[in-house]
Image (cartoon, helix red, strand yellow):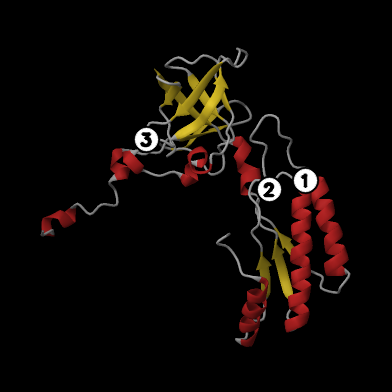
Amino acid sequence: ESKYGFTRDQLFEGYRICRDKGIKRFGIHIFVASNELDPNYFVETADILFKVIVDISRALNIRFEFANLSGGIGIPYRPEQDPIDLPAMSRGIKEKYDQIIVGRGFAPLKIFTECGRYITGPYGYLVSKVLHIKDTYKQFAGLDACMANLMRPALYGAYHHITVLGKEKRPHDFVYDVTGSLCENNDKFAIDRMLPKLTPGDTVVIHDAGAHGFAMGFNYNGKLRSAELLLREDGSVVPIRRAETVKDYFATLDFNGLKRFKI
């Protein structure tokens, strides 16, 4: 049910149309994975794509300059997960390249990939404060952040590890829904998460927020996006993005147009 890409028959038809219109340079891009940690998945993907390249090239007498193996290289969001074995993935893809592309006379073929999450994801943290604890039929820890700052948990039900500064060594013997402040019931960073006992004022750190964090932010409910700080290797901190202001929020509205506005 993916919205992406062509069927196999449509690929042949699409490249034929391009060839007949005079296009001379060709590439192909596949999009098949998201946060995948199994290196064999990418080797199998390369096998499929390389064989498609050979079949289309032979059928249409065209030459491919590059293949984009997509992104999707994952990071271990959960503490018990292991990182992907990149050397094993690379060896497997190289074997497929030599066997299918070189072996059948279609080299050289440039190989691209998109590793945005792998490069940035583990190196960003959303730092927030506990504003209040609500005790009803379960315990809720309300933060001063919300899904405007990190949408993944609300959008996908994605797991992000959470630590509480100064309480890292304490027993995780309380169960909380860790929530944001939007009037949306899915505005939660964690559901039924075991954490140390929380109190208002605690600093909560949400891990692996370097990808799909600020870039997916929004201003629903008038929420203003937070500042971003860069932590250098020497321990110094440099502001790299200021916090949004109310002036930013209204910056694109044409208030001057109100003078001419008629109902």
Pointer 1 or 3: first along the chain: 1
Residue 132, x across and y down, in percent: 39, 19
Q: What is the secondary structure assignment of the residue under circle 1?
A: helix
Q: Position of residue 217 (x, y in %)?
A: 44, 43
Q: Is residue 225 above or below residue 192?
A: below
Image height of 91 relative to 25, above or below: above
Q: Nearer the viewer, mark 1 or mark 3?
A: 3
Question: Where is mark 2, residue-wise?
Answer: 73
Looking at the rendered image, the disc whose residue lies closer to the viewer, 3 or 2, is: 3
For the residues marked 2 and 1, what is the alpha-carbon distance in whole angstroms? Answer: 9 Å
Q: Residues within 10 Å of mark 2 (few under 14, many from 20)?
A: many
Up the image or down, 68 lies above or below 127; here it is: below
Q: CA distance from mark 3 to mark 2?
A: 31 Å
Mark 2 in CB contact with mark 1 (< 8 angstroms):
yes
Q: Amino acid at mark 1?
A: Leu
Residue extending farthest front: 137
- Front residue (pair 7, 220): 7
Q: Secondary structure at mark 3?
A: loop
| Residue of label 1 | 86
CA distance for labels 1 and 3: 39 Å
Image position of 54 (left or right of 224): right
The mark nearer the N terminus, 2 or 1, is 2
Residue 144 is drawn in which quadrant? top left
Picture disc at residue 182: 3
x then y, percent, for residue 75: 67, 40
